Image (cartoon, helix red, strand yellow):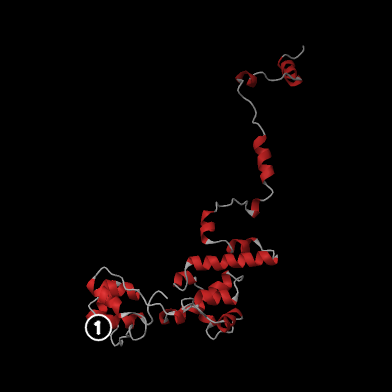
Amino acid sequence: MTKPLMAKATAVWLVDNTTLSFKQIADFCEMHELEVQGIADGDVAAGVKGFDPIANNQLDPIEIERGQADPAYRLRLKHNKAAEGEEKRRGPRYTPLSKRQDRPAAILWLVKFHPELSDGAIGKLVGTTKPTIQSIRDRSHWNINNITPIDPVALGLCRQSELDAAVQAAARKRAAEGVVMSDDERRKLVSTEQSLGMAPEAKMPAGIAGLEAFTLSEREEKPADFSDAESFFNLPQNDDDEDEDEDDNPRR
């Protein structure tokens, strides 16, 4: 573990019972210094009961003494063998209450634009359960008609790097299974960094496909050469001119 249990309540206790600086408490509880100052001013964590880190075997009393004697000293969390491995998150991701109503929109976006993602991968990305995902897949969700697909990254439910990692994992899994993907599916499996680095591919519009050879053959034809002006006056002689002369001088 890198921070104490009930960090905010621990910060309340340290503010009330020690002379540690706001920065020392903030570093120990992994909070912002201004947030700790807000606790001291009564603007933050109003009504939160302090949590004693010493009584709960998270901090040695000697650490507080050292910290109060030296403002630059960083408190060290007491090692607890029983808490080993607890930092690894288990189960679905925790989603704040303010964003839980956005999860159906994110699920619908992932189901629509990344159908290769499994229910487990979607659940880890947005912090939801498989029954909820399945209800959106088969459109049996109670509010399905009012759900608009929205990118979970834009909603703040996951990071772009996490989405790219899940997409790449799906790509490797499908490649290992020998599944043949279409061009559109392969394009979806490309990460953001790769897609932004790709040069745009020039494509021939379908309406003029097959006409490129005709166009080139037309361009290869050389125009007539009229650079010799005298050629305009060297007109060929024919019998019509002789007939006209004979008409002008009729026989007598």
The x and y percentages for residue 49 are 30, 88
Classify residue 93 as left or right of residue 131: left
Q: Is residue 31 visible?
A: no
Local crowd at mark 1 within 10 Å, few (<14), some, or many (≥20)? few
Q: Is residue 54 visible to us here?
A: yes
Circle 1 — which element? helix
Q: Residue at x 64, y 20 (%)?
A: 231
What residue sits 52% from the left and 68% below the top?
163
Say what amino acid the circle numbered 1 marks. Answer: Asn
Residue position marked by numbered label 1 in the rendering: 17
Quarter of the figure with the N terminus: bottom left
Looking at the picture, how far across and down is residue 8, in whole percent?
33, 81
Q: Position of residue 88 (x, y in %)?
A: 49, 76
Does residue 50 sit above or below 181 in this rendering? below
The relative height of residue 248 versus residue 203 in the rendered view (above or below) is above
The quadrant of the picture occupied by the C terminus is top right
Q: How many marks?
A: 1
Q: Position of residue 65 (x, y in %)?
A: 26, 76
Residue situated furthest front in the rendering: 62
Q: Nearer the viewer, residue 143 or 238?
A: 143
Residue drawn at 54 percent across, 57 percent down: 194
Left/right placement of residue 76 relative to residue 150 reads left
Front position in the image: 215 or 72: 72
Q: Which corner quadrant of the image does residue 48 belong to?
A: bottom left
Nearer to us in this view, 7 or 157: 7
